[in-house]
Amino acid sequence: MTTQDTLPAGKVWLVGAGPGDPELLTLKAARLIARADALVYDHLVGDGIMDLARPDARRIYAGKEASKHTMPQGDINQLLVDLAREGLSVVRLKGGDPFIFGRGGEELETLVGSGIPFEVVPGVTAAAGCGAYSGFPLTHRDHAQSVTFVTGHLKDGTVNLDWPALARPKHTVVFYMGIGAAEEICRQMINHGLPSMTPAAVVRNGTQKDQQTVLGTLGTLPHRIAESGIKPPALIVVGSVVGLHEKLSWFEGKA
């Protein structure tokens, strides 16, 4: 930043917008959003966050929803280059953290190849936000000594994951983009050694006023998802820490 009110021209900031609640933005993220000339933002950027932008800032929606992409990734990459070459200060705003299933690395590779200067501002990733706001401590000395974030997004009808490594006791697994593959995920986790009674949950719109948590087990979760009608964006959390929800939940229904 060159002064308190302006940003360097011809530069891109890759900024994590956090899991939805605007108050979970970092101070740096909020400051950059308020001063940028142009903002390229995603579907998962929480309500109210774009209100921080200058009234005259250019706002470009580049959201991706399940099976519905407003703008192909290659076009987004080139857009960032083009905006910077116009001499604009550009904030590329992504839900959660830009380097955790956010394709931030792909966008930066394009910027590097085009000689565009950039900075990265981390954000609270969805797993951390959903865990905290649902009463699931992702690690806990009595329940989970490790946690894994993994994509559950289907490609060509398969979920090609290292199931033996995921289906371990004393371990929490968070599946991003996994709702459409929930039945396969639960089946594979059981087939590779976890009991069907292992606690599992889905959290939709985590940290936001309309957060919805659906509890179950590996054996019942697919039915619970169908029964509740829950839709993306949502995370699946598997592990005994989910069983702490009743004791530790503080947000849902109380916000």
Image (cartoon, grey):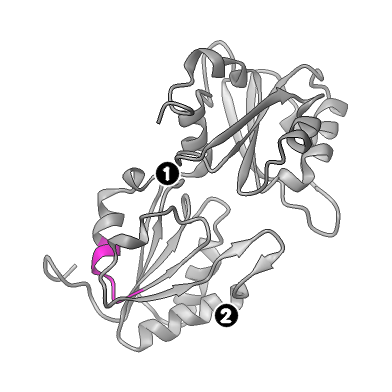
Kindly give the residue lying farthest to the bottom in the view shown: 86
Residue at the spot 57% in from the left edge and 20% down from the top edge:
145
Q: In the displayed structure, would residue 87 be above or below residue 51?
A: below
Query: Callout 1: 10 Å neighbours few (<14), some, many (20+)?
Result: many
Asked if residue 53 lies in the magenta stretch, the reply is no
**Which disc number belongs to residue 124?**
1
Q: Nearer the viewer, residue 112 or 83?
A: 83
Q: Are marks 2 and 1 in contact (CB under 8 Å)?
A: no
Split into 4 quadrants, where in the image is the C terminus? Answer: top left
197 with respect to 11 (left or right): right
Q: In the displayed structure, would residue 203 be above or below residue 71?
A: above
**Which disc number belongs to residue 52?**
none
Report the amino acid beneath label 1. Answer: Val
Residue at the spot 68% in from the left edge and 41% down from the top edge:
230
Point out the tag, 2 or 1, that comes first from the N-terminus: 2
For the residue labelled by badge 2, is the local secondary structure a helix, a strand or a loop?
helix
What residue did someone put label 2 on? 75
Q: In the displayed structure, would residue 141 be above or below residue 93?
A: above
Q: Position of residue 149 (x, y in %)?
A: 60, 40
Q: Position of residue 106 (x, y in %)?
A: 55, 67
Q: Nearer the viewer, residue 200 or 215?
A: 215
126 with respect to 117 (left or right): right
Quarter of the image where one finds residue 112: bottom left
CA gap, disc 2 and disc 1: 26 Å
Split into 4 quadrants, where in the image is the N terminus? Answer: bottom left
Residue at the spot 46% in from the left edge and 30% down from the top edge:
133
Q: Which residues are magenta?
A: 32-38
Q: Position of residue 82 (x, y in %)?
A: 43, 86
Residue at the spot 25% in from the left edge and 64% down from the top edge:
34
Query: Callout 2: 10 Å neighbours few (<14), some, many (20+)?
Result: few
36 with respect to 130 (left or right): left
Report the amino acid beneath label 2. Answer: Asp
